[in-house]
């Protein structure tokens, strides 16, 4: 694609955002749809992949096959390790190398529109899978981008307007790994010792079909299933040797948040967050993992007995009845609005859940050692922010039983003055709960379902484009569940998704380099996203 084409497209998008869209409707959507139909001959791809979204019937549970949506891939050009199939309904793992030029022929074979987003990857806007680019059945969208990210774990999933939640739920997701020279020098566990764990919760009917029922309760809280799948399989269990492993964990669930810890109390050792490796490994008692977040763990099974096992669990957390009464804030009392059937557990989990079982099967003598330092990571400070007097707001709010950002819901080409970002700048962004002008007392007291619920639901906020850093987390007002999660956050790594707890205010610093156009920010609780808890930044 030439620059001129790119500019023209930008103009069309800009025009579409103005009144032109109303008078010449085909200018707005039709033009952007179906763009990128032909490969750009001057883009010399190192890797070419044909990726289809299609329906399939796969084996997930014993018995009848499950009807799913599935990404299938075929490597057309590049190293054979680029594509790794997983059994089940998830798409192939895409293994990229930093600096590689990648072309993906995405073809939609589904009976509904679809578009794919490369979550965490720093790519130009036409390659980012904005819903404006959705294609219909039998159409093709060609992605071309250079892998600019450092080594780390990202993922891809559908990003279709108001259909992201059901499409991802039915299977449209897959993992992306990026590797680079710096990472290779560290000698981290690789090959069979580098293990992906994609965690999702699902619900099945008695004949093994995926069930996605949304009453008001599920809509507000987001879908929670009663079966945990790891890499698309139930009761996930993996044989391991007595040595160190690297676990790449993605929370690919629509809405469920996990509190990951080892069953025997071994501390969790994190080596990477969403955007790549940490400066140095970090030990925590447990780690919180919200939808779309990734964490990479180091776990050394050395010294364990063959025949024994250890499980990765999701531990009890939240503002449930397990909390001592003294710790319950006024919020729960105030949530008397009732009738929503969700008062006891606006978020959290009442009992420990097994995520994956590691069975020690073989004793071996040798294991890599955990490096003391990983990668260098310059910390952003307020001095780095381009406009020191500007704070870009992301206000989480609710009106008419629908979540909003900055007082608005998603509109394809809409952006406000506060959502205009000059390209090649570094911005300070504040994510907070908009109390709609109600005072603290009112807030605690709640008001029917709405306010109480709004204040007590955590939101994983995701920003497209480059990875950001967390500047600060502040509990503005005490939430009853916070004590149960507060040691599980890593604030030192590159992030593209951050879990904003009830009562919490988070400041981040994010670069907006290289690419102009619309870049989304939204809640990655996919039910919230589909109800419009999403907005555009217009980078220009
Ligand atoms: Cu994981 Cu806007 O996406
Ligand atoms: Cu949300």
Image (cartoon, grey):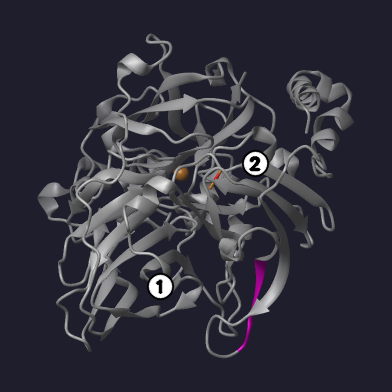
Residue at 49% of width from left, 41% of height from top? 149
Please check the rendered image and state whether residue 453 is part of the magenta-colored stretch, yes or no. no
How far from the left and from the top, in percent, is residue 446?
33, 38
Q: In the image, is 273 to the left or to the right of 2?
A: left
From where the camera sits, is residue 418 visible?
yes
- Which residue occupies the foreground of this view, 409 or 492? 492
How far from the left and from the top, in percent, is residue 169?
57, 62
Q: Main secondary structure of the magenta part?
A: strand
Residue that label 2 marks: 145
Residue at 73% of width from left, 21% of height from top? 14
Q: What number is the disc on residue 46?
A: none
Q: What number is the disc on residue 192?
A: 1
Picture layout, residue 459 above or below residue 259: above
Residue at 77% of width from left, 48% of height from top? 141
- Which residue occupies the foreground of this view, 418 or 372? 372
Picture layout, residue 18 above or below residue 532: above
Please give the range of residues in magenta: 64-70
Q: How many marks?
A: 2
From where the camera sits, is residue 129 visible?
no
Q: Which SS class for mark 2?
A: strand
- Which residue occupies the foreground of this view, 503 or 174? 174
Q: In the image, is 257 to the left or to the right of 161?
A: left
- Which residue occupies the foreground of this view, 113 or 509? 509
Would you say the residues marked 2 and 1 are in contact, meaning their CB atoms lie under 8 Å apart?
no
How far from the left and from the top, in percent, is residue 99?
55, 42
Screen quadrant of the N terminus: top right
How far from the left and from the top, in percent, is residue 439?
30, 24
Crowding at mark 2 (Cα within 10 Å: few <14, some 14-19, many 20+): many
Gap in Å between the C-alphas at discs 2 and 1? Answer: 29 Å
């Amino acid at each position: 694609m030439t620059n001129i084409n790119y500019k023209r497209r930008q103009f069309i998008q800009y025009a579409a955002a103005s009144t032109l869209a109303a008078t010449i409707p085909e200018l707005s959507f039709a033009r952007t749809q179906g763009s990128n139909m032909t490969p750009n001959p001057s883009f010399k791809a190192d890797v070419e992949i044909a990726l289809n979204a299609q329906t399939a019937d796969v084996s997930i549970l014993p018995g009848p096959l499950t009807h799913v949506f599935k990404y299938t891939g075929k490597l057309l050009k590049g190293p054979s390790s680029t594509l790794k199939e997983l059994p089940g309904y998830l798409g192939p793992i895409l293994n990229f190398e930093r600096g590689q030029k990648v072309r993906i022929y995405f073809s939609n074979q589904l009976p509904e529109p679809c578009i794919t987003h490369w979550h965490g990857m720093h790519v130009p806007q036409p390659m980012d899978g904005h819903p404006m680019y959705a294609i219909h059945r039998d159409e093709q969208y060609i992605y071309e981008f250079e892998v600019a990210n450092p080594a780390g774990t990202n993922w891809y999933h559908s990003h279709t307007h108001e259909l992201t939640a059901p499409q991802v739920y039915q299977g449209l997701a897959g993992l992306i790994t990026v590797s680079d020279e710096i990472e290779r020098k560290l000698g981290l566990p690789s090959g069979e010792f580098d293990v992906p764990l994609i965690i999702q919760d699902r619900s099945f009917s008695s004949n093994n079909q995926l069930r996605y029922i949304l009453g008001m309760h599920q809509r507000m809280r987001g879908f929670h299933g009663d079966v945990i799948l790891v890499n698309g399989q139930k009761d996930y269990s993996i044989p391991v040797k007595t040595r160190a492993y690297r676990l790449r964990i993605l929370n690919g669930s629509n809405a469920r948040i996990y509190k990951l810890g080892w069953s025997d109390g071994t501390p969790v050792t994190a080596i990477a967050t969403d955007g790549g490796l940490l400066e140095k490994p970090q030990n925590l008692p447990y780690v919180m993992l919200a939808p779309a977040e990734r964490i990479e763990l180091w776990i050394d099974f050395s010294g364990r007995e063959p025949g024994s096992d250890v499980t990765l669990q999701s531990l009890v957390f939240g503002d449930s009845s397990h909390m001592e009464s003294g710790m319950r804030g006024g919020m729960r009392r105030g949530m008397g609005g009732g009738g929503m059937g969700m008062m006891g557990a606006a978020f959290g989990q009442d009992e420990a859940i097994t995520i994956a079982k590691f069975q020690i099967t073989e004793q071996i003598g040798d294991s890599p050692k955990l490096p003391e330092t990983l990668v260098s990571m310059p910390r952003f400070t307020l001095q780095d922010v381009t406009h020191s007097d500007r704070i870009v707001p992301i206000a989480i709010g609710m009106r008419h039983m629908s979540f909003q950002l900055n007082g608005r819901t998603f509109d394809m080409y809409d952006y406000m003055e506060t959502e205009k970002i000059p390209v090649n700048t570094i911005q300070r962004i504040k994510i907070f709960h908009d109390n709609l002008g109600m005072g603290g007392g009112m807030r605690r007291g709640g008001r029917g379902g709405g306010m109480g619920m709004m204040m007590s639901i955590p939101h994983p906020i995701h920003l497209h484009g480059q990875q950001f850093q967390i500047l600060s987390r502040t509990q503005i007002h005490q939430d009853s569940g916070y004590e149960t999660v507060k040691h599980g956050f890593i604030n030192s790594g590159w992030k593209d998704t951050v879990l904003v707890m009830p009562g919490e205010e988070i400041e981040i610093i994010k670069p907006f380099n290289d690419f102009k156009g619309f870049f989304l920010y939204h809640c990655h609780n996919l039910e919230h996203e589909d109800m419009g808890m999403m907005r555009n930044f217009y980078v220009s």
